[in-house]
């Protein structure tokens, strides 16, 4: 098994597999999650390090990854990472990458033409990059037969403005607009049912259109929370949003609501950027939450 491709996990009748695009140190804790006291990180060093925090470099550790779901005979991708060859002047650490992501996806048994649905939990550059790939100098959909589910609020927020009808966001230009032109985009708001086992629900704050994907199959439950959580410290301190959130207060309110339901209904919480086990079950701990167990 490729070290960037996990063995599958079965929840009810849905198979889940993780394909990692990259893993790297990110921001220092105080920069990523302002307001969380430094001593909290040290108090939980025994399990935060090394997967989620590197005390030596003083950086939060993060992964960029795609979740592959097989449900009711369809192949669903949840978020598509950064992508290769992107011009990212505002995010140089994501610029002009050359990773083996598509080969890793193939190792997980997924060819681009096999993908039926792409879910972008929101439209930040590390969640939509492999929506497209370069072909003969143009950006074209990587998954030509897929329907791309995108939050309408994010599409409006990052999309074209002004008389020329062009977006000023390079991420939108190379990773969203080509999908629109190919007629593969489906915009949704509020709630969207994918099939009997998978649904999308608005979870705003990180971006205007941020969303979560819920899985309910048999007695098993999971919630793919995108960037609602960047670090497990936000499970312990859910009132603290990341520096990347457009509306920190709304993001915190959404986080508490989603984690509360996850604890009450025993949903496996699957964030976009957790390394290690990648997912956890949570429990209530007073006015906060705690990890009750990590995914196998």
Image (cartoon, helix red, strand yellow):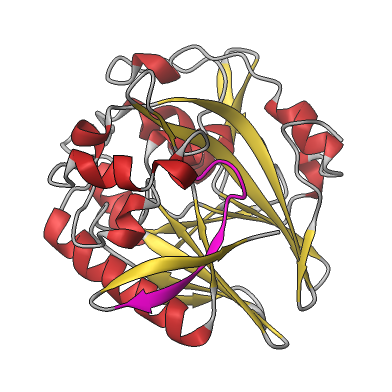
Q: Residue at x 49, y 39 (%)?
A: 128
Q: Is residue 132 above or below residue 40?
A: above
Q: Is residue 41 left or right of residue 106?
A: left
Q: Is residue 243 visible?
A: no
Q: Is residue 258 above or below residue 127?
A: below
Question: Residue 18, percent across and down?
Answer: 68, 47
Q: Camera-side residue: 58 or 202? A: 58
Question: Residue 245, percent across and down?
Answer: 22, 47
State yes or no: residue 121 in magenta.
no
Q: Quadrant of residue 164?
A: top left
State yes or no: residue 276 in magenta.
yes
- Residues in magenta? 274-285
Q: Is residue 250 left or right of residue 222?
A: left
Q: Is residue 204 left or right of residue 186?
A: left
Q: Quadrant of the C terminus?
A: bottom right
Q: How many marks?
A: 0
Q: Residue at x 39, y 63 (%)?
A: 211
Q: Residue at x 82, y 44 (%)?
A: 110
Question: Residue 280, percent across and down?
Answer: 54, 62
Q: Quadrant of residue 98?
A: top right
Q: Camera-side residue: 224 or 86? A: 224
Q: Camera-side residue: 181 or 202? A: 202
Q: Camera-side residue: 150 or 255? A: 255
Question: Residue 139, percent across and down?
Answer: 55, 25
Q: Is residue 224 visible?
A: yes
């Amino acid at each position: 098994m490729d070290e960037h491709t996990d063995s599958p996990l079965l929840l009810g009748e849905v198979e889940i597999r993780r394909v990692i695009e990259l893993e790297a140190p990110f921001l220092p804790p105080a920069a990523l999650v302002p307001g969380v006291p430094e001593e909290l990180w040290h108090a939980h060093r025994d399990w935060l390090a090394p997967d989620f925090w590197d005390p030596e470099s003083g950086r939060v550790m993060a992964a960029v990854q795609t979740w592959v779901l097989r449900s009711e005979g369809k192949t669903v991708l949840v978020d598509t990472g950064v992508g290769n060859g992107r011009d990212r002047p505002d995010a140089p650490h994501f610029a002009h990458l050359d990773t083996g992501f598509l080969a890793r996806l193939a190792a997980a048994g997924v060819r681009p033409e096999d993908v039926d649905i792409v879910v972008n939990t929101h439209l930040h550059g590390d969640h939509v990059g492999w929506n497209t790939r370069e072909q003969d100098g143009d950006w074209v959909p990587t998954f030509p037969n897929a329907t791309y589910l995108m939050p309408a609020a994010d599409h409006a927020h990052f999309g074209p403005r002004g008389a020329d009808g062009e977006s000023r966001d390079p991420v939108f230009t190379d990773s969203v607009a080509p999908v629109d032109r190919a007629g593969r985009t489906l915009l949704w708001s509020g709630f969207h049912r994918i099939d009997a086992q998978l649904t999308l629900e608005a979870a705003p704050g990180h971006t205007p259109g941020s969303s979560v994907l819920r899985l309910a199959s048999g007695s098993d439950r999971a919630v793919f929370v995108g960037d609602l959580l960047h670090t497990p410290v936000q499970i312990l301190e859910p009132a603290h949003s990341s520096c990347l959130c457009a509306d920190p207060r709304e993001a915190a309110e959404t986080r508490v609501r989603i984690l509360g339901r996850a604890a009450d209904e025993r949903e496996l919480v699957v964030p976009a950027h957790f390394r290690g086990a990648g997912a956890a079950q949570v429990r209530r701990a007073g006015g906060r939450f705690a990890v009750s167990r990590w995914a196998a």
